[in-house]
Amino acid sequence: MTARAGIIWTLLLIVAGFFSLAFIFYTLFPGQVPANAWQYFTPGEVERARRYQQIMRLAGILAFLAQTALLVWLVSSTRAAAWSDGVLRLTGGRYYPALIIYFILVWLLLKIIGLPFNFYSSFIVQHQWGFSTQSLASWWLDYLKGSALDLVLSGAGVILLFLATGRWPHTWWAAAGLFLSGWLFVATFLWPLVVAPLFNRFQPVTEGPVPTIVTRLADRAGLKIDQILVMDASRRTTKANAYFTGLGATKRIVLYDTLLAYPPDEIEAVVAHEIAHWQRGHITRGLLWGILANFLLLGLLYAVLKLTFTYEIARPGPYPPHLLVAMLLFLQLVSFLGQPVQNVISRRYETEADRVALELIGNPRAMINLQVDLARKNLGDIAPPPFIEWLTSSHPSALARIQAAEAYSRGQ
Ligand SMILES: [Zn+2]
């Protein structure tokens, strides 16, 4: 490892450590919520939501730290390289079988370390707080299906990536960036058709107030919207939500069935928000940001690997399997540190969608009631500490969204 590589890795670890400590500090000591919160929420509600968020945040950051610690240990000790030699001996020096075994080994270790945190936050806590409607068997089925999908897709990705390092030892990152960009479009297009149905059932909404709401709002937004589906979310949770997904012909708005119990004007506010994402092309714009980020990330990855493993990379043929661990560590750290950028873009889109939604429905009161109801029932942190919001919030806080609706109402 060159001295420069040492400095880069040390810096990455120090900043990630600092972010993690600050995250834990503000999770434990979130401070006061702004005074205007009391207009909408009782101290008991705020306290309860904060306690729930505290638990979820701690489980999340501890899982991240545990997995990062494993990767740091593998990279910094000689383990990663020793295992790589071991599997190569096992396969009689055949590279690709060795790479596959090595990948599965590292993948399994990360999975095993993450499992207790995952189980705790998505099963135990969800039951303790009265959200989960899922049996243990059904949770495991989800977990196994999700893991199998992840194993196959990331396994294929790793094989292609290492193939590319053999073919283009110094420009593989550009090839990988191009491939990943294409894949992002394909995956976004196919996700609602192939992946989502593995976990839920989707049905067009034909009854209740929704069809009329959609026709009216789509008309106002100047869109033709034929895909509004209801998802059987209640088989897992009592939480309510909605999302906009897909690309081109697979574009659709999905409402949780748990949302249908809400008052019609609040459902209208939700649908208007999702239609606003649709009208403003937020998925396509998000994809373009994603592509930019991919090239940047892969280019940086190559630069860091070149400084760290100068000798291994100079040899002909694909990179040795143990570079996988350093790649994973780098991506883990950089995507953790890159969250503020990703979230600032996401929050901007969400703010824009709320504003367009207000224009579409012309009813700020409904939007305010919706935010209050969602925060109450989903135990959302209505005003997270600024550092936590900056680092991890993909949406503006409930209080910020309420204030935006109030401002709109004053300007009407
Ligand atoms: Zn949104």
Image: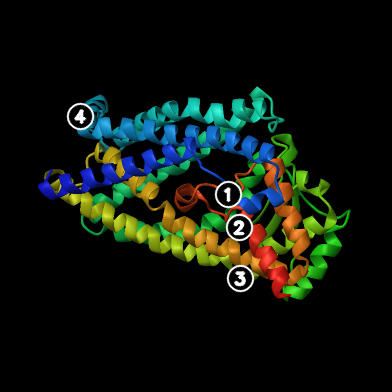
Q: Tell me the distance, in whole angstroms, between the alpha carbons under discs 3 and 2.
A: 21 Å
Task: Look at the numbered disc 3 and give the secondary structure of its residue.
Answer: loop
Give the amino acid at mark 1.
Answer: Ala
The C terminus is located in which quarter?
Answer: bottom right
Query: For residue 356, which quarter of the picture?
Result: bottom right
Q: Is 379 in front, or is 67? A: 379
Labelled pair 3, 4 in contact (Cβ < 8 Å): no
Provide the residue designation for mark 2.
400
Provide the residue designation for mark 1.
383
Task: Look at the numbered disc 1 and give the secondary structure of its residue.
Answer: loop
Disc 3 packing (10 Å; few <14; some 14–19; many ≥20): some
Q: Tell me the distance, in whole angstroms, between the alpha carbons under discs 4 and 1.
A: 42 Å
103 vs 376, left or right, is left
Provide the residue designation for mark 4.
77
Residue 277 in view here: no
Q: Residue at x 32, y 32 (%)?
A: 69
Please tell me the numbered disc located at residue 280: 3
Labelled pair 1, 2 in contact (Cβ < 8 Å): yes
The image position of residue 155, as x and y in percent, is: 41, 40
Along the polypeptide, which appears first: circle 4 or circle 1? 4
Q: Is 220 in front, or is 310? A: 220
Q: Residue at x 72, y 41 (%)?
A: 377
